Amino acid sequence: MGRRCAWLEGVTPPSVSDTAASDSAPTPGWVDEAFDGVRYGLAGKVIAEQQSAFQRVTIIESERYGKGLLLDGCWMTAERQERHYHEAIVHPALCGAERIERVLVIGGGDGGTARECLRHPGVQHLDMVEIDGLVVEWSRQHLPSIGGAAWGDPRFQLTVGDGIAWAANATDASYDVVIVDGSDPAGPAEGLFNRAFFAHCRRILRPGGVFATQSESPEAFRQVHLDTVRLLREVFGHAEPMYGWVPMYPSGWWSWTFAAVDGPRYRQPRPERAAAVADGCEIWSPRWQQGAFEAVPAFVERALAGA
Ligand code: SPD
């Protein structure tokens, strides 16, 4: 799949230019991810932008959701919307795995996934392997609340490097949970959606382990979504998508897919683990999770049944 995002800014909708009639009101622009004839945008302005060795990294200040991060013009996260995504990708895996001593996060350079993992007291060591050092540096500088306590947690080990190579070189059965918090399957994240990579993720999971990945939008990226779920079922034996919302992402309707070898253990949160984190969550709860796994759209159910 080629690059899919276009970049638009400085487009001022009528409602904004009307209110900007007074001299004191600044005229914000719009920062949009454009995909397939639709734009997903926030009113705000770019405060930092640079081409790294891997991608264009952009930090914006938005009116509604605080500071945000885009990679190659695609929305990744924002200060006041990140919990929809990070709680969803982490807690079904961390509450369902048999053990959670050793966790691997591939990608996740803004720190939000690591932060949610490290809220689980049973995690003893977390490796985070992010390919782009600029994403980490700017997330720490501009979006410090997203990584929060993770950046200084003694259990947290950051490696700036290739997560695909990390998985390929890791010892068999060396992690209890593997979470892939990558961007869309284009550019540096393309290799995070293929069979060889998923097979290594299965190999490095301990018995009773759980794998999790973001699996795109069932509306905006239907084929990628279906292909990802199918492939994970083939590789792991058990894999199920879970559906929620990340309003700034294309269509707002998003999915995460969880996989395990010994059964769908990601479906049933262990009560003591859930109790340790639920009060601090904005979106996730065992009840929300149950509904989110059940909310499989009919077309997905049909497509997967015919797989
Ligand atoms: N289309 C956006 C997919 C982004 C998935 N990763 C987001 C990074 C948040 N930690």
Image: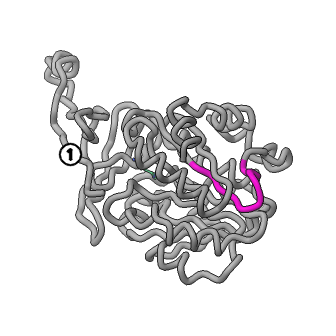
Q: Say which of 11 and 263 sits in front.
A: 263
Q: Tell me residue 22's x, y (percent).
A: 16, 18
Residue 45 found in image quarter: top left
Q: Tell me residue 76's x, y (percent).
A: 40, 49
Q: Amino acid at mark 1?
A: Trp
Label 1, secondary structure: give it. strand
- Residue drawn at x 27%, y 40% is 35
Q: Residues within 10 Å of mark 1 (few under 14, many from 20)?
A: few
Q: Is residue 145 above or below residue 251?
A: below
Q: Say which of 155 and 283 sits in front.
A: 283
Indicate left or right for 187 with 273 as reference. Answer: left
Q: Is residue 161 on the magenta stretch?
A: no
Looking at mark 1, is its residue's CB closer than 8 Å to ligand 1? Answer: no
Q: Identify the magenta region.
A: 257-266
- Residue drawn at x 18%, y 41% is 8
Q: Say which of 236 and 188 sits in front.
A: 236
Residue under numbered circle 1: 7
Residue 12 visible from this viewpoint = yes
Q: Tell me residue 63's x, y (percent).
A: 34, 32
Q: Tell me residue 33's x, y (percent).
A: 28, 41
